[in-house]
Image (cartoon, rainbow, N blue to C red):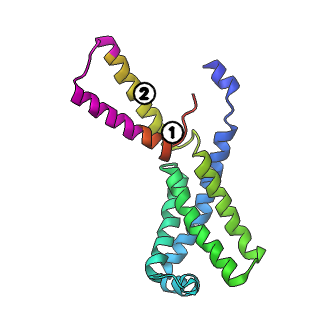
Amino acid sequence: MLTTILTKSISKDTALLLLRVITGTVLIHHGYEKLANIENFADAFVRPLHLPFPIFLSYIAAFSEIGGSWLLIIGLATRFGALAIMGTISVAIYHALITSGFNIFLLELLLLYFASSSCIALSGPGNFSIDEVIIRTLKSEENNINETNTINNFQPKNNLNNDTEKKEGFFQFLQDNLLSDISS
């Protein structure tokens, strides 16, 4: 344990925590502003792009910003939340380019949101997140099951073995795709 404390830096996890919380906190108000006057948002941003169902897409944009921001803040399904934000911000960047050209004053904040959510989606939420707590809990349960099977020298039946494989496959999918990376 002492080697873990001395060799592993918490600066990466702290930086990811700050990035997640600040990005989510600052971005969440944009979603609430969209909900406050959804018709105005649809007229100003969705209809000029000639997209179908502008009101529906406006609600999608608002809820992806609100939901994605909350997921970033609490660190639950963080990559999914970051991808939702990336999608909405990508459309906003496209809108800014189409309507105003390369106007750095309009693009700079959008590009910062996009870069922040991209970094979070690519690197995961870090150790200071609910995702990490879930992974550690699942990992300890898996280790306890393996230790129990080894101690009792128990060979499960084929159908129980298939159920265990399905559970491990589902947990492995969560770990690999939606939750944070496990650092040994």
The quadrant of the image that shows the N terminus is top right
State whether residue 22 appears in this view. no
Disc ID at residue 16 = none
Instruction: Determine the secondary structure under disc 1.
Output: helix
Q: Residue 150 at x, y = what percent?
A: 34, 14
The stretch in magenta equals 150-171
Asked if the residue under mark 2 is in contact with the one under mark 1, i.e. CB atoms within 8 Å, the reply is no
Q: Residue at position x 55%, y 65% from top?
A: 87
Q: In this view, does 54 lie above or below 148?
A: below
Q: Residue 52 at x, y = what percent?
A: 46, 82
Judge whether residue 14 is colored magenta: no
Instruction: Determine the secondary structure under disc 2.
Output: helix
Q: What residue is pinned by disc 2?
A: 140
Q: Residue at position x 33%, y 12% from top?
A: 151
In this rendering, position of residue 91 left or right of residue 143: right
Towards the viewer: 99 or 66: 99
Q: What residue is pinned by disc 1?
A: 132
